[in-house]
Structure formats: structure tokens, C-alpha cells
């Protein structure tokens, strides 16, 4: 049954094998084995539960929910069932059910730090920040070295605008499993802001492209204290970040950093600078497109787009591996109200797999699929100068537009990333960006309409 | 093998196989010794001259059994077999004559003519080219190449050879002038075609097919009275010619007289009973019935046309070529693969191509007709040279030192080395070809191209002209498929033979277009056929606006319909 024919194994062993497959990302093997076990034991609660998790990971959400609900009905007092169900419901956008499960999990296992952590997650999704903070704190009382709970606490505090407290908890981000490799392997200390000789501070462009662009504004502040810092970043960011004054060398491999006395990730700079909502530096624009590229793209756009229409840039999808991509990414077709405007021409600056959605676009507004012609961020930066407005989801292009001072309408999920704060349609990080928030979780209705009405 | 192999040759030449298609050239007699057979050859010639063909045949078979490469005997047997309609034998024999040393122009010409007469024009090109090498100034050879190129769609090459033939000939040949006229008609140069037909008929008028060709030119010029008069004249000369009768039906349909069209086609059906109408006749009958509102009968006629093609002409749907083209588009047109493609600069002073993209029967011809009402916009119709350029690209890449790749994969190779010159060269050739065919002139600002292969080639078109407008005509897929079914055209992979296979073609082409749209930057505008029909002025205005052309669409559409010159 577990692959070696004729050898008897226990159900527990098979379930462990499924869990191992699932943990290692071998989802097809996990699903195959889970389905076979489920046929043999269709009423076994743990088989149902585990096969539900595998189905969820395979994107079969209704099947997952059905099986896991059944397992819970069969064994209503197993704490792990509601704890996991909470996440499945959250993923499916059923926030009330998710909360009910989180509370049930905590009730069944009040000493389980993960149950409280899951509770904090769902409270964040519901924008119940005080409850989210309390749940994260309870998880940390039970397990003070729980990086995810610290990080969740940071996100709650930052989203609520309590930046000074939030930055402290935010320091736990490098202990998260997914942060592995983001920092150099070194015995040198993290920089504390004190003076460092020229070229002896290593700046690390950690996190996503958007974070690096956002926190790149602190580089001149760094250079006043540690002249000509060496910047380690992804090759994609080199042409963008190198134009910020104060940087010394830029490297794209750890081996090339050379000797340094201390290091600091870019995302650690707001804390070091003591940034609060009132002291966010906005030296905008701090990214400047190449004039030759601006002229080249303007000429191209003049040739490609009809005259007499306002040009609206568009990005509708983010990097699919981003943890919140499901929340932030929309379908091109969801911008239909934008396409219905006779005075607009759409210029998509989307990159990646989702550009193929343009192949199915037949809307009334002329649409130029510029993404395939864009080579790097410097192209996008230059193109933005020839657009009247950028409409985008929460992705790196929004940061490019914000950092170069271009007018932007940014659509945000109900519970957004912490940097966009709550209850406001502007952002202290980028004065040229206007925010359009979901009114209800996972429901984009009305968002694009409001945005279009403001154009 | 038996000591004496009497097996007859399967080509039906009448010779033994070992003396015909199974001949071992190593054991042949010295041609110098053929002279001993002269008396028998003379007897054969005499018999042939006096109409005693069986006797002539007997003599040449004897000669060829002894001397299989006896040129005169082979030629006489070839003539006999050709006259009998034994075309496989005739072809085998003429190929053998053509291979003899020294080479003879006549053999190559006859080989090519034999193939042309069977409609095998592409195959005929090789022997015709061999003949041209031997006799480059021979009017017959050039005339033959003119026919071959015209019938294989290489219209300008055909025109060149027709004109060379005219230049080399001592006398003006009405058939040659008529063929050049047909070539002009195919190129859309209707006025020139009409003049040439007039010149041909001044020399010789009793040519029913020529008259029918001229009638088609006059119909295209909307001179329907003249067209019908010509067809009547042709029909009087060849009353049983069904092609001429069919043209008469089509002109009646053009004149919006479906009742008379139907009566004519039914008269043809009655005259040939119990023989059946052919596909083109059934399709015309369907159109007449449809115009009369007899939709069920019309559909039955369309079905009969397609059934004829499937069951009588053996045309079965083969999805392989369509699937292969789609797969090629999907693997080639990927943004990362093409991101470094050279972008040919717009050609100063040249008109800009406007690609009218659409699956068959989606309405690109209607849009083109509307657009060319605007002075400065000229139609290439379906005669744009993109398919030729697509065939040329791999050779050009290889010629510029690149690897040998097929189209469209060869496109990716234009990113490297000297091959980066390939796309600008082809863009220049595109325009030069249209200039050569007088499709565009000094006053042209735009040229519309609605080539049938555009759904497959739109990515290539955009690679040649990156800023060229692409107007995609969309029509409800059910209408597209039904309208395609109501034709006699077979389309790729014989997709026309059923509604389902037409739907497959539509789906594949729309997928190909979507792939290119998703993965490349196009200057693209979709427009709906239904909108063009409901409000032509608004639709035309939208397209002109997209082209940045200032004009009043209503005034343009109210002007008399422009006819290609």
C-alpha cells in the first residue's frame, strides 16, 4: 500500500508517509496515496483530514473543505482539526467560519501556541487588530521563540500605525523559515547606526523588489553615517538602486561583498532611523528614469496608442510565489469598468506568465500589451513618464511609480500589507499614490468602479 | 528473378518492366548502334502518320525492347500514351526522354506541360526551369513558367515570364495575352486585365474560357451587363461548359436575382442527370436558396457540396497541419524568446501596412472595402507577400550564416549576428513586392493586408512592422463557421468539409492569435463584424481614428464604391 507490495504497514505509517510527501512538496505522490487510503477507509477522521489538506494544497478547495468538515464532525474534540480548518477557511475567504474554527481550536488546546497564532492570522484578515495583537501575544507567552508569531505581531502593529513598536517585532523576520539565505553568513554584527569607515558597511537588499525600492530611500541617510556602503542586491535591482546617491559598490553575489565591519538589511533601516508615521522620509522622486529611455518609450507609445486618449498603465498580477499573491492578484477582465471608458487607452506593463490574459482581451478601450517589450525596471520607470496614470495591484511597479512620483491608483485587499496602513486613501510613503481598498474581504466589487470614477 | 522477365511495367507503357521503369542503365546498347533500327522506326512513323496507331505501337515496343533509350521510339510511344490518356505511362516516358543526353528543351517542356495539364503546377516548375536553362529566350518556355507561377500564387513572377514570352515571340499569341490578362486579374489589376483581354480577342475571339475570364474581370469591375454578355458569348461557343454556366449563376447572384440563379443551376442539374452537380455548383445553389429564404433547402445544398467533397473528391479533414502550425506559434511566440528581436525602423516615405486580421469569413473584406474608400488607403486584399516572406526567412537566415531552422522558429535566429539584418530586409521586400504589383503607388499612405494566413503569421507581420496597426475583425463564431461551411473552399487541412472541422480551424487560429497577442506588443484594435454591419460609419470612424486618419466616415461611405483599378 505504501509502495512496497506485499509488506504490511500500519495506517499510522501510511499517514506519516502522506504527511512527509505533503511537507516535502511532493503533492502528486501525497494525493495519490491519500486517495487510495481514503478509498480503503472512507470514514476514518484522520484520513479524511489529511486527504483534505492534500486536496487543499492541490487547489481542490471544495473537496478539502468537505472532507475536513466531515473529519471534524466525526471527531469534534481533536484540536488540530479546527486549527487546520481555520487556515483552509481563511484561504477560501470564509472569514467567519475561519474565526469560529480558530476559537474552537483555542478552546480545545489553550496551551497550543500555533492555535493562538492561527487565531491572530484570522483576526488580522478581519482587521480586528486589538484581538489579533492579543492572540499573537498569547502565542508568544506560550512560546517566546516563535518567529511567525513575532512577525505577525509586527505586521499587526505596523498596519495599525504603531511603527516604533512594530519595527522591534519586525526584526524577527529573518528567523522565519522562508527568510533563509536573505542575509550573509557572517559573524559580523548588524549595524547599530554608529559611524563606519567608507566602504565597510554592507547593505543587504532583502525582501521583495518593492520593499527594496521602498527602503532604498534610506540609503542617503546611511551614507551620511557610513560612507559608500556596499550594496548586495539582485541583478534586477542594480540599474534602479545604483542611481540613489551615496552607494559605493554594488554586488550581486555574497562572495563579491569583500570585507565589511557590519551589515544591515534595507528593511532594518526604518527601525534604525527611528521612523514613525510623522518622520517617514519622502525625498520623492528618488528614482529617475534615463532621459534617452523616456524619449524612446514616448516615441514608441506615440506610435502604438491612439491620439487624444489618456494613457493608463495597468498591472493586475504579482509574482505567483508571493505569500499574499492570491489576495492581491486579480484577473485582467476585472478591470472592465476601466476598459469601458472611451477616453482611455490602456498600456499594460505587466510581466510574467499572466501576460497571456491579454490574448483574451476584446474590450472597447485600445490596449497595448507593452509587457513583452519591457526588459527591466529602467524600462518600466521610463514608460511611467509617458502615462497619465498607473493602475496597479500591490506589486513592485507601484513602488517604482511612487518613488518616481508618478500618479498611481493602487488597489488593495481588505487586509492589506502593513505598509499601506488602514483607514486612509493616501500613503505617507508615496504622496503620488492613491489607495483603493476592498470594502469586504476577497471581494473586489466596487473597487475598480470607484477608481475609474476618480479618473 | 527469372532468366527472362516478361513482367509488364506497372506504369502501363506497354513495355516490359525491365525495359521501362525497372531499367538497368548499365546494360544499354550504344546509341551509335540505334541506326540498325532505323527501318523499323521509319515504319512506325509512317503507321502513326497514317493513323495506324496499333501498328506504330507494335513497332516502337519492339525497338524499345532492344534499345530502351531510343529517343525517337520513346517519343512516339509517349505521344501515343498521352493521346490515350495513360498519363502515368506518358509521364514515365517523357521523364526518360528528358534524362537522355544531350538534353532537349522539348522533352522538358512536354514533361512540364503534362504536369500542368494535370493541375500539378508546383511539380511542373522543375522541368520548366530545366527547359529555361537550355532556352532562356524561348517564348514557349517562358509562357509555361508564366502559367506555373501564376497558378502557384507567385503572381509577379508569372507576370514577368508572360511579359518575357511576349517580348521573345515573333507573333502576338492571343492565348499568351489572355493568360497575362488572367494574371492581372489575379493581381487585382482589373483595368490592365481588361485591356489585355481586348487585345487578345482582337486577334482571336472564339475562346470560351478566355471570354469567361474576361467576364470575371468585368464582374469584379461591377460591369455586370458586359460580364453577362461575355458569358452568353462563351456559352454559345461551349454550351456544355459547366464552369461558364456556373459563372452565369454567380453573376445572377451578384445582381441579386436568386430566382434566376436557381433556375439556371437547376437547368444544369437537369441537363447532366443522373450525374450529380459538383461542390461549387451545390454551393451556388445553396446561396440562391438562402437568398430566397429557403434556409433548410439552402443548408441541404451546402451539405451536398461538402458531402461531394468528402465522398466523391476524397477530401477528408486532416487536423495535423493546423495543429502543427498552432504548436509552432505557441513554442515560438514566447516573450522571453523574442525579447531581443531587432525592430525594423519604419521605412521613410513608404506606406504603412495595416493588417486586417481575422479567421476565414469573419468580415475582413468588408472592412477593407470600407477603408479603401479613403484616398491613400490601398488594398493588397489577400495578395500580400507575407507567406512568401515566411518561406524566404529560413533561407535568408541560413544565407546570412545562421543555422538551418524552419519557419517560424527561424524568427528567433534573427536576434544573432548578421541575421539581425534579415527582418529589415524582408520588410523592404514586402513593400517592394507591393510596389512591383502596383498595389501601392506614390500616393499610398496605407496598404491593407488581409492575407488568409494572417492568423498564423500576425506575429511575423508585427516583427517586420512593429508599429503597424492590426485590426482584428471579430464575428460570432457560429456565424463564422456556418458562413465558412456555405462556401466551396476547403481551407487548411480540408477543414471546410464539416462544421466541426471548421470550428476546429477557428479555435486553432484564435488560439494562435491569442498567443501572439499575449506574448508580443502589437498596435491592436478589435472590431466586431456585427458593429460594422449595424453602424458602418461608426465602425469606420473608430478604425480611422485608430489609424490617426482625419476623415468623415459617413461621407466616405456615401461615395460610390471604389473598385480596384
Image (tube, coloured by chain):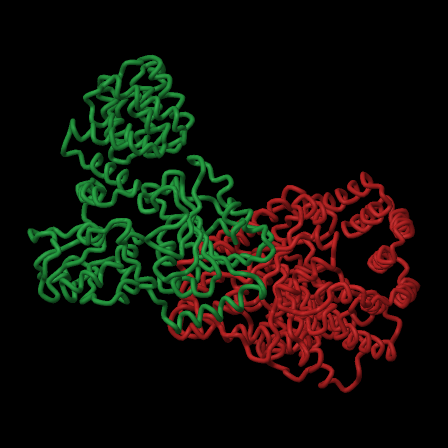
Chain colours: A green, B red
Say if A334 sits above or below B439 in the image. Answer: above
Q: Which residue is at 88% across, 64% downward?
A: B224
> Which residue is at the front of the view, B295 or B178?
B295
Position in image of residue B269 (x %, y %): 87, 48
Q: Quadrant of the N terminus of chain A?
A: top left
Position in image of residue A170 (x %, y %): 21, 43
Q: Is residue A160 visible?
A: yes
Position in image of residue B540 (x %, y %): 70, 61
In this picture, residue A9 sits left or right of residue B455: left
Q: Quadrant of residue A343?
A: bottom right
In this picture, residue B356 sits left or right of residue A112: right
In this picture, residue A363 sits left or right of residue A240: right
Q: Is residue B37 visible?
A: no
Q: Which residue is at 35% across, 24% downward?
A: A35
Q: Quadrant of residue A432?
A: bottom left
Give the total number of marks visible in the rendering.
0
Q: Quadrant of residue B207?
A: bottom right
> Which residue is at the front of the view, B86 or A189?
A189
Say if A258 sits above or below A413 in the image. Answer: below
Residue farthest along the front direction in this orientation: A278
In this picture, residue A205 sits left or right of residue B490: left
Say if A103 sits above or below B120 in the image. Answer: above
Position in image of residue B470 (x %, y %): 59, 62
Q: Which residue is at 74% across, 54% downward?
A: B535
Amino acid at each position: 500500500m505504501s509502495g512496497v507490495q506485499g509488506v504490511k504497514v500500519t495506517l499510522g505509517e501510511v499517514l506519516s508517509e502522506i504527511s512527509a510527501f505533503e511537507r516535502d512538496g511532493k503533492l502528486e505522490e501525497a494525493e495519490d496515496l491519500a486517495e487510495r487510503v481514503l478509498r480503503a477507509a472512507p470514514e476514518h477522521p484522520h484520513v479524511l483530514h489529511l486527504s483534505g489538506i492534500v486536496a487543499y494544497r492541490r487547489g481542490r478547495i471544495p473537496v478539502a473543505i468537505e472532507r475536513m468538515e466531515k473529519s471534524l464532525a466525526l471527531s469534534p474534540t481533536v484540536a488540530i482539526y479546527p486549527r487546520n480548518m481555520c487556515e483552509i477557511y481563511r484561504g477560501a475567504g470564509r472569514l467567519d467560519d475561519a474565526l469560529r474554527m480558530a476559537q474552537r481550536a483555542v478552546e480545545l488546546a489553550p496551551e497550543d501556541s500555533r492555535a493562538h497564532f492561527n487565531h491572530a492570522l484570522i483576526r488580522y484578515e478581519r482587521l480586528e487588530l486589538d484581538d489579533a495583537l492579543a492572540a499573537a501575544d498569547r502565542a508568544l507567552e506560550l512560546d517566546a521563540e516563535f518567529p511567525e508569531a513575532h512577525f505577525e505581531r509586527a505586521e499587526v502593529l505596523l498596519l495599525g500605525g504603531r511603527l516604533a513598536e512594530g519595527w522591534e517585532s519586525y526584526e524577527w523576520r529573518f528567523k522565519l523559515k522562508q527568510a533563509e539565505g536573505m542575509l550573509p553568513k557572517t559573524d559580523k554584527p548588524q549595524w547599530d547606526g554608529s559611524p563606519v569607515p567608507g566602504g565597510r558597511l554592507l547593505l543587504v537588499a532583502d525582501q521583495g523588489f518593492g520593499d527594496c525600492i521602498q527602503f532604498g530611500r534610506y540609503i542617503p541617510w546611511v551614507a551620511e553615517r557610513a560612507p559608500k556602503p556596499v550594496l548586495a542586491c539582485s541583478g534586477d535591482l542594480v540599474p534602479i538602486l545604483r542611481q540613489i546617491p551615496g552607494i559605493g559598490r554594488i554586488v550581486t553575489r555574497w562572495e563579491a561583498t569583500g570585507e565589511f565591519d557590519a551589515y544591515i538589511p534595507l528593511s532594518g533601516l526604518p527601525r534604525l532611523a527611528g521612523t514613525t508615521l510623522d518622520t517617514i522620509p519622502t525625498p520623492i522622486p528618488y528614482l529617475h528614469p534615463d532621459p534617452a529611455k523616456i524619449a524612446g518609450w514616448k516615441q514608441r507609445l506615440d506610435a502604438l496608442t491612439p491620439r487624444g486618449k489618456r494613457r493608463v498603465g495597468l498591472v493586475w498580477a504579482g509574482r505567483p510565489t508571493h505569500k499574499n499573491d492570491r489576495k492581491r492578484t486579480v484577473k485582467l477582465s476585472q478591470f472592465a469598468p476601466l476598459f469601458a471608458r472611451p477616453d482611455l487607452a490602456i498600456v499594460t506593463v505587466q510581466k510574467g506568465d499572466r501576460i497571456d490574459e491579454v490574448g483574451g482581451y476584446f474590450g472597447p478601450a485600445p490596449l497595448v500589451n507593452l509587457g513583452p517589450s519591457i526588459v527591466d525596471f529602467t524600462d518600466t520607470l521610463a514608460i511611467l513618464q509617458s502615462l497619465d496614470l498607473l493602475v496597479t495591484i500591490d506589486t513592485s511597479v507601484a513602488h517604482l511609480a511612487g518613488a518616481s512620483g508618478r500618479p498611481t491608483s493602487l488597489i488593495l485587499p481588505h487586509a492589506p500589507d502593513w505598509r499601506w496602513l488602514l483607514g486612509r486613501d493616501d500613503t505617507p510613503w508615496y504622496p503620488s499614490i492613491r489607495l483603493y481598498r476592498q470594502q469586504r474581504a476577497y471581494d473586489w466589487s466596487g473597487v475598480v468602479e470607484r477608481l475609474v470614477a476618480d479618473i | 528473378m527469372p532468366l527472362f522477365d516478361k513482367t509488364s511495367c506497372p506504369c502501363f507503357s506497354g513495355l516490359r518492366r525491365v525495359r521501362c521503369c525497372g531499367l538497368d542503365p548499365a546494360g544499354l546498347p550504344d546509341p551509335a548502334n540505334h541506326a540498325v533500327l532505323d527501318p523499323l522506326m521509319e515504319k512506325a512513323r509512317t503507321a502513326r502518320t497514317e493513323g495506324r496507331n496499333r501498328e506504330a505501337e507494335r513497332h516502337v515496343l519492339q525497338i524499345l525492347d532492344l534499345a530502351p533509350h531510343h529517343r525517337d521510339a520513346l517519343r512516339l510511344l509517349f505521344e501515343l500514351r498521352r493521346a490515350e490518356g495513360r498519363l502515368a505511362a506518358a509521364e514515365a516516358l517523357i521523364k526518360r526522354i528528358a534524362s537522355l543526353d544531350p538534353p532537349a528543351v522539348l522533352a522538358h517542356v512536354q514533361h512540364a506541360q503534362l504536369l500542368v495539364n494535370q493541375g500539378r503546377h508546383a511539380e511542373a516548375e522543375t522541368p520548366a526551369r530545366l527547359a529555361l536553362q537550355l532556352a532562356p529566350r524561348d517564348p514557349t518556355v517562358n509562357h509555361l513558367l508564366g502559367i506555373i507561377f501564376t497558378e502557384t500564387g507567385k503572381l509577379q513572377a508569372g507576370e514577368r515570364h508572360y511579359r518575357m514570352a511576349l517580348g521573345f515571340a515573333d507573333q502576338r499569341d492571343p492565348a499568351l495575352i489572355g493568360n497575362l490578362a488572367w494574371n492581372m486579374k489575379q493581381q487585382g489589376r482589373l483595368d490592365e486585365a481588361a485591356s489585355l483581354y481586348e487585345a487578345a480577342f482582337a486577334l482571336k475571339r472564339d475562346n470560351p474560357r478566355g471570354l469567361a475570364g474576361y467576364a470575371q474581370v468585368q464582374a469584379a469591375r461591377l460591369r455586370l451587363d458586359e460580364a453577362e454578355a461575355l458569358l452568353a458569348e462563351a456559352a454559345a461557343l461551349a454550351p456544355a461548359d459547366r464552369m461558364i454556366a456556373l459563372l452565369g449563376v454567380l453573376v445572377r447572384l451578384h445582381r441579386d436575382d436568386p430566382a434566376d440563379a436557381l433556375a439556371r443551376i437547376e437547368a444544369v442539374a437537369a441537363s447532366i442527370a443522373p450525374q450529380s452537380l459538383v461542390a461549387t455548383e451545390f454551393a451556388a445553389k445553396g446561396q440562391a436558396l438562402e437568398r430566397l429564404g429557403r434556409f433548410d433547402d439552402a443548408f441541404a445544398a451546402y451539405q451536398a457540396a461538402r458531402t461531394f467533397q468528402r465522398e466523391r473528391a476524397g477530401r477528408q479533414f486532416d487536423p495535423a497541419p493546423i495543429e502543427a502550425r498552432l504548436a509552432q506559434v505557441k513554442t515560438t511566440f514566447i516573450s522571453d524568446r523574442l525579447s531581443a528581436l531587432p525592430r525594423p525602423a519604419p521605412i521613410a516615405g513608404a506606406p504603412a501596412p495595416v493588417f486586417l486580421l481575422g479567421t476565414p469569413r469573419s468580415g475582413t473584406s468588408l472592412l477593407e472595402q470600407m477603408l479603401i474608400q479613403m484616398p491613400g488607403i490601398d488594398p493588397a486584399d489577400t495578395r500580400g507577400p507575407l507567406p512568401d516572406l515566411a518561406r524566404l526567412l529560413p533561407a535568408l537566415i541560413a544565407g546570412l550564416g545562421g543555422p538551418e531552422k524552419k519557419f517560424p522558429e527561424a524568427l528567433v535566429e534573427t536576434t544573432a549576428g548578421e541575421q539581425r539584418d534579415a527582418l529589415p530586409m524582408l520588410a523592404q521586400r514586402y513593400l517592394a513586392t507591393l510596389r512591383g504589383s502596383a498595389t501601392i503607388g506614390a500616393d499610398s499612405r496605407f496598404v491593407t493586408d488581409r492575407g488568409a494566413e494572417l492568423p498564423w503569421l500576425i506575429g511575423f507581420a508585427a516583427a517586420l512592422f512593429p508599429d503597424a496597426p492590426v485590426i482584428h475583425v471579430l464575428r460570432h463564431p457560429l456565424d463564422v463557421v456556418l458562413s465558412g461551411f456555405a462556401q466551396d473552399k476547403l481551407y487548411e487541412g480540408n477543414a471546410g468539409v464539416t462544421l466541426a472541422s471548421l470550428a476546429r480551424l477557428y479555435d486553432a487560429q484564435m488560439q494562435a492569435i491569442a498567443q501572439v497577442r499575449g506574448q508580443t506588443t502589437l498596435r491592436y484594435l478589435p472590431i466586431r463584424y456585427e458593429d460594422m454591419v449595424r453602424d458602418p460609419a461608426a465602425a469606420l470612424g473608430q478604425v480611422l481614428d485608430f489609424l490617426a486618419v482625419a476623415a468623415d466616415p459617413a461621407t466616405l461611405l456615401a461615395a460610390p464604391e471604389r473598385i480596384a483599378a
